[in-house]
């Protein structure tokens, strides 16, 4: 049975750290990639992310979007790879942690799923209690 497409990326999924200092072209590429992914233009979104990563190889949000694209294309192994890169670059990326927990659960890896869920819960609590920015 086909899985439903994930919900569009939430506006709060914007990069949390380098957003203020990111060059406009990088911010616009990120916004473009997000729009393309939301509209189902997965090739366009991947190309926009690739262009962004060519300019800034440490863009956690670009890897997050690539993970979403790969999930929509039914490629969970590549989605996981991108989301792991995302949390390597931004360990508190809540959405990536949640997606990794779900993938681990679906793959029958209960201990990994539990660890990702616990990390996501800690991030969520910190963001809620510390006045998320």
Image: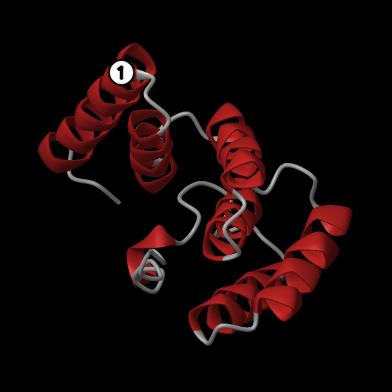
In the image, 65 versus 127, the foreground residue is 65
Q: Secondary structure at mark 1?
A: helix
For image coordinates 42% across by 38% down, the residue present is: 103
Left or right: residue 114 compared with residue 41: left
Instruction: Find residue 61 and report its horizontal and vertical position in percent.
Output: 57, 53
Provide residue 74's location: percent of width, then percent of height. Answer: 57, 58
Q: How many marks?
A: 1
Q: Which residue is mark 1?
A: 110
Colouring mode (rainbow / by chain / secondary structure / one colour): secondary structure
Q: Residue at x 20, y 30 (%)?
A: 121
Task: Give the quarter of the image for residue 1.
Answer: bottom left
Q: Position of residue 22 (x, y in %)?
A: 66, 60
Residue 71 spot, x, y in % from top left: 53, 56
Left or right of 126 on screen, residue 42: right
Is the residue marked by circle 1 packed among few (<14), some (14-19), or many (20+) residues within 10 Å?
Answer: some
Left or right: 57 as drawn, with respect to 108: right
Task: Tell me which residue sits at (28%, 31%) in the image.
Answer: 120
Q: Is residue 131 above or below residue 30?
A: above
């Amino acid at each position: 049975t086909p899985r439903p497409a994930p919900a569009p990326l939430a506006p709060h999924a914007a990069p949390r750290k380098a957003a203020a200092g990111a060059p406009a072209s990088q911010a616009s590429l990120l916004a473009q990639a997000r729009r393309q992914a939301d509209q189902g233009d997965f090739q366009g979104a991947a190309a926009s992310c690739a262009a962004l990563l060519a300019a800034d190889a440490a863009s956690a949000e670009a890897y997050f979007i690539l993970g979403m694209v790969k999930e929509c294309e039914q490629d969970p192994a590549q989605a996981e790879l991108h989301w792991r890169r995302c949390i390597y670059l931004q360990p508190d990326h809540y959405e990536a942690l949640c997606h990794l927990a779900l993938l681990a659960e679906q793959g029958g890896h209960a201990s990994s799923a539990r660890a990702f869920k616990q990390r996501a819960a800690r991030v969520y609590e910190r963001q809620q209690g510390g006045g998320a920015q």
